[in-house]
Image: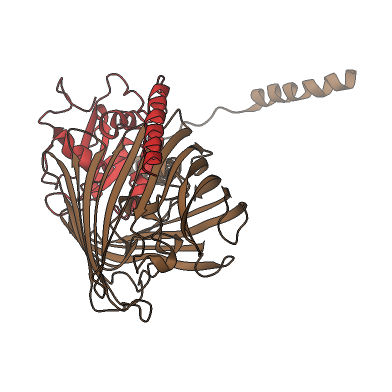
Amino acid sequence: MRHRLRYLLLPLWAGALSAQETPPAPQQPPPTLEQRLEEVEKRNRELTERVRTLEEDLDLNRAAAEALAEDSDEGPGLGLTIRRGTIQATVQLFGDVGFEYQNPQEPDRGNAAFFFGGVNLFATAQVGEHFQVLNETVIKHREDVDQDRLVFDQERLWGSWIFSDPVYVKLGLEHGPISRWNRLYHHGRWLETTIERPMLARFETSGGFLPMHNSGLEAGGRLHPSIGRIDYVGVVSNGRGRTPDDPQKLSDSNDAKAFDLGVGFSPACVEGLRVGARFRYDVIAPDEPDREGSIRELIGGASVEYRSASWEMLGEWIYLENRDRHTGETYEHTSGYAQLGYRIDSRWTPYTRFDYRRMDKGDPYFEPLDRDLDRWEQLFGVRFELTRNAAIKLEFGFGRMEEREDSGVERDSYIRTGLQLSWVF
Amino acid sequence: MRAMRWVGLVIVLTSSTFLLGAGTRGFEGTPPPAPADKRVAVIVNEKNPVTDLSLADLRAILKLERQFWPNGRRVALFLRPGESAESRVLLDKVYKTSHEKLQKYWVSKLFAGEIPAKPSYVPTAEAAGSRVREGEGAVSVVLSTEVPKDVRVLSIDGRRPDHAEYALR
């Protein structure tokens, strides 16, 4: 203990002695003007360097903050956006899987089955201020190819030059404007409120009877008069193939082209309302020996939709007339649906839809694939937003449909229920 | 067959009535209330010839339904993050929807090929000013008390942000 105290006091004694022995410091001469200038310049260099470092840090922080802001607000999906020079590209992937039960079952199937909806590879890019390209490729199941085989299907591929708001020109493969649903949702099942598309918007290879794809030249635009917004589109395309399941994406079986016209109006006085009308003319090539004559096809349609923060209403009606130029017979078909959805709190959207199609029997274009059969369905469902990027939909539907038997066309009631998980990333 | 269709129609109407009755409380789909005493200024590049917009035209531009300025330059939209005061004013007065539904709206527009890219987001008023100064077609929104230098503030329906009846407040 005593030794420790001695060691502690030792520095104090040493300090006192050194203080007594230190001679007074000599008087320093005042710095000259040059020395002071040099000192100021040195200090200036240090401060300049310090400011530069701080500015670099600030830039880094700003960039990080901007990246953070974009990360938190880019919305559903990863929003993979690549910018380089005047090119800005966005990539998104959609997917869906599910389960379905139907009674009575479809031919050659059981009542219940899990299903693979599809994987949608979507990319679009803006090059400069006026040029845009878009690609949509879907990996999906095609009933007409094989019950259990997946195929790559090119759904959209086009380039568009946008001169200004009133005029754009688009060349390539695009979904046709004959159905509003078709142009709203394309193959993005996550975007659709329901599991299934309505009958008039089903694709050519999935039992649909309308042309959903156009391979051709499209022109259109938008006007903004004070009364609201007017949008319009016109298309010249290959038209339909010899059978309803051939969209002629790659070639054309005849020289006659299909013509589409569409117009929509969104009044300024009712935010979210849009009404539209569309028309199509096509001449379908003969399909010998089954069908000797060409078919002149006329389609007219109308749609109305209303969207607000909570409400979502969409309705369409289509009239289709096929005239067989060999027999002179005319066949008239109509189809329509009315869908209503209401968003409750942040996640739940119950919905309902009435859907029907009424077809003249014996249309030589539709009959070989049984697409001239009547059907109606009432649907109830609910959509639940699992996360910002994924939704679960549960549906129950019932209705009546016609089936072609050896004895002729028979009607039967059916029920179906389905569950779908869809997402975007 | 026809009778069954009518039955279906009745079911639709009945369910509609039920759904209408469900809307009795605040919904996520509705826009958040705009913060009190916050006024939002719409800023554009100084070379942009536009000085005034009607609220309807502004809505068309901010929803990218209108994508070109009168001088032919393409609109480049820079928005503020969803929780910012500027965003809340826009959701309430312009978009009339929630932030989540607005995000889905952009995905829908992009997927339909109606817009080539989703709008970009800027974290600060100064960053908004920087983007607007860089691009002739750029447009953004900032609080009227934080207007950056060297940008043009548009009047809406002929009213400046300090006007008592200014629309974006």
The residue shown at (36%, 69%) is: A247
Residue situated in front as seen by the camera: B41 or A43: B41
The residue shown at (48%, 38%) is: A381
- Give the number of callouts: 0
Q: Is residue B111 visible?
A: no
Image location of residue A282, percent across then percent down = 24, 68
Answer left or right for A261 relative to A60: left
Residue situated in front as seen by the camera: A285 or A232: A285
Query: What sort of colour scheme is used for the picture?
Result: by chain
Image location of residue B18, percent across then percent down = 42, 25
The quarter holding residue A320 reads bottom left
Instruction: Residue at the far bottom: name it.
Output: A289
For chain A, give the colour. brown
Answer left or right for A212 relative to A230: right
Image location of residue A42, percent across then percent down = 39, 45
The residue shown at (33%, 38%) is: A313
The quarter holding residue A288 reads bottom left
Image location of residue A357, percent across then percent down = 36, 51
Q: Is residue B31 visible?
A: yes
Residue B37 vs A148, above or below: the answer is above
Answer left or right for A325 relative to A337: left
The residue shown at (40%, 37%) is: B8
Residue situated in front as seen by the camera: B87 or B152: B87
For chain B, give the colour. red
Residue A9 vs B96, above or below: the answer is above
Instruction: Residue at the far front: name it.
Output: A407
